Image: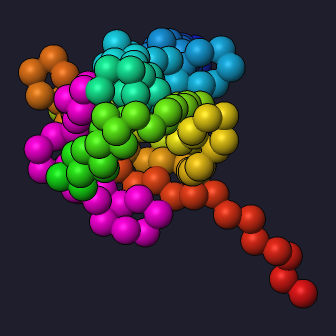
Amino acid sequence: MDIKLSGLKILAGTIACLFAVFVIMGIIRSEYSISGEQKKTQEDALIEKTIIDMANASTQFPKTKDPQSILRFYSQDYAGINNGKPESVQDIAKHLSDVLEQLNLGAPLGISSKVTNIRTGVSGLLGWATYDAEYKVGSGGVVLQTTQGPCTTIFRKQGETWLIQHEHCSTARQFPFAR
C-alpha cells in the first residue's frame, strides 16, 4: 500500500510540475511571437511611431520651415552624443535655425531622413530604441552631407508622449582588416 501511495505522490508531483511548466510557457508565449521575437506592446509601437514621425518631420522641414515640428520630440533636458560630440536641444535648435536661414535666403535645400531596423523596449515611464538612421542634405540634386549609422535612444514618457531624453548616433565606419 505504501508503494502505491508513494507512486501516486510522485505522479501528482510530476503532474503539478508539468502544469507549472505549461503555465510558464503560456506566459512567455503571450509575450513572444512564434518566431521568438518579443511582441510589441502599445508603448513599443508609440516609441517606434515617434522615431518614424521625427524622421518624417526632418524630411518635411524644408517645406514646413517649422523648427517645433522637430524640437517637439525632445525633452528640454535632452543630452545626446552625435558622432562623439555632445549635443543639447539648444544645439539642435541652432542647427535648425541655420538651415532655416539658408532656406529663407532661397537655397534649394532638401532633406531625406530615414530610419530602419527599429527595436524598442519599455519599462514603466522609460523606453529605449535602437535603429539605423540615414540623414542626407542636398541642393539642386547634389548631396551635400550624408550621415548614416546606428542610433540608441532613451525616451521618457511625459503625459501621453514619449520624449527623447538621450540619443547616441554614430556614423558607420568601415575598418580595414588588421594585418
Provide residue 123's location: percent of width, then percent of height.
27, 34
For the question of whether residue 17 can be seen, the reply is no
Is 33 on the left or on the right of 124, as rendered? right
155 or 42, which is in the foreground? 155
Left or right: 69, with 55 as reference point: left
* Residue 4 vertical position relative to residue 103 in the rendered view, above or below: above
Total label count?
A: 0
Residue depicted at 57% across the width and 40% down the height: 138
Residue displayed at 67% across by 63% down: 173
**Residue 158 placement: quadrant:** top left
On the image, the x and y values in percent for residue 110 come to 51, 32
Question: Which span of residues is magenta-colored?
Answer: 66-89
Seen as rendered, the residue at the extreme right is: 179
Single out the residue that lies furthest toward the front: 105
Is 79 contained in the magenta span?
yes
Q: Is residue 49 visible?
A: yes
- In the rendered image, residue 171 lying in the magenta stretch gets the answer no
Front-most of residues 138 and 77: 138
In the image, residue 94 above or below residue 86: above
Q: Looking at this view, is 166 or 72 the one in front?
A: 72
The quadrant the C terminus occupies is: bottom right
